[in-house]
Image (spheres, rainbow, N blue to C red):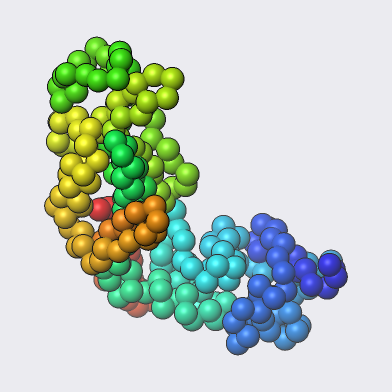
Amino acid sequence: MNNQDVSILNVGGVKFTTWRSTLQQFPESRLARMLGGNDLECRLVNGQFFIDRDGVLFSYILDFLRTRQLSLPSDFSDYQRLQREADFYEIYSLADLLSPESLLKPKLEILEIRFLLQEMQAFFRVFGSCSITIGELAGRITVFSEKLVGTTWKSHNDPSQKSLIPLSLERPSHHDVIFQCGTDYSDQFIARYVSIKPDQRKLINGTNVLGLLVDLLLKEGFRLISTRTVSAEEKIECYSFERKRQPDTFSISMCQTQQGTTISQQSKGTKK
């Protein structure tokens, strides 16, 4: 690695280290010109580029340069100030994303269910583009385990509450959740039931659980857009859904000042 490939920035007292190529993602931007020493407001001081701007907001600017995606905390509210910073750095594609018109547009949310049925067991994996939705869905799903004596049972449709043990769902990431139901015979005979709120039933049949999960998504505004077989050999079925999710809403008001008219935005924190 060549030291000339790395740049250190001091933005309002907050230091950042990144590749020069990251700062050159938008060749016409002020950051790209800064590397060539062609911007008087971004000066090289003791081997660091000093920029007299907000260092906290610059972290979001740098993240956008690295990922080409706008990712902000759920409680973020300084959209107008961040748009002003994007304009200063002349990253106009980011400034457009932060405009009131763009922020108020419904966002397309994708969700996918992968379903595998093997003999008496059913396996589910749910992926979602919105981690908040996946978290809410995981909060509605409870898996119960019941140990049975022998290899058959008579009352599996009405399990005893005392014999049920709640199990934790598997969360490989913020964007997916894994669970299973049905029966499994290894060292012991195990039955797994799934309950999905607000439905109070405890279902052991994978097809019934799938139907209940699909019904829940449809009631939550999702639309089934496709079904396909991911693996013909393993018989993995995939159900894809989408919905237009309204983003955080904003109160846009006109404030008269002595200098003129300004627009202020206040996040209401409304989430679907």
| Residue at 41% in and 68% down | 80
| Residue at 31% in and 56% down | 237
| Residue at 33% in and 74% down | 102
* Viewer-side residue, 131 vs 70: 131
Residue 40 drawn at (x, y percent) = 70, 81
Q: Quadrant of the N terminus?
A: bottom right
| Residue at 85% in and 70% down | 2
- The vertical placement of 226 against 191, above or below, is below
Residue 201 drawn at (x, y percent) = 15, 31
**Residue 240 in view here:** no
* Viewer-side residue, 272 vs 256: 272
> Quadrant of residue 179 in the image?
top left
- The vertical placement of 145 against 119, above or below, is above
> Quadrant of residue 43 in the image?
bottom right
- The vertical placement of 126 against 244, above or below, is above
- Answer left or right for 115 relative to 174: left
